[in-house]
Image (cartoon, grey):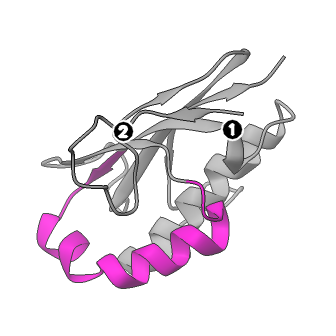
Amino acid sequence: MHMILQPEGWAKPVGYANGIAARGRLVFVGGQIGWNAACEFETDDFVAQVRQTLENVVAVLAEADAGPEHVTSMTWYFTDRTDYLANRKAIGAVYRAVMGNHYPAIAAVQVAALVEDRARIEIQAQAVVPD
């Protein structure tokens, strides 16, 4: 469905792709954060907010008849790089539970703050649904 772009001689990335080529209908998911459908935070735990954020991304994708397997690119914005790095294993487990073993091109960026005070992570995604 999508072609993973892995330049010859490059080390294989873990948990993401260097690039993806795809054809089809484009789906853009605006920045999602770790609150529920009522826009309420249920926890301040970083990993739990990652799970909720990914579930929110999947819910938006479903509105376009798309799923995690269609995601080609994601940008993760988090407020604490140390917390992100300390929880990589747990984040990986949560990612696989929600998104499966599909790894798009991903950028991860620490930011000073997010618009919602309790938000610790925000994820924006792009997907391509084959024609």
Q: Look at 36% across and 57% down and name the residue there.
A: 121
Asked whether residue 40 is in view, the answer is: no
- Considering every residue shown, the one lying at the far front of the view is 9
Residue matched to label 1: 70
Q: Is residue 13 above or below residue 65?
A: below
Element type at marker 1?
Answer: helix
User: Does 79 appear in magenta?
Assistant: yes
Residue 48 picture location, percent across and down: 49, 78
Residue matched to label 2: 6
15 horizontally vs 20: left or right:
left
The mark total stands at 2
Q: CA distance from mark 1 to mark 2?
A: 18 Å
Element type at marker 2?
Answer: loop
Q: Look at 41% across and 84% down and name the residue there.
A: 90
Q: Quadrant of residue 27?
A: top right
Q: Which residues are magenta?
A: 76-102
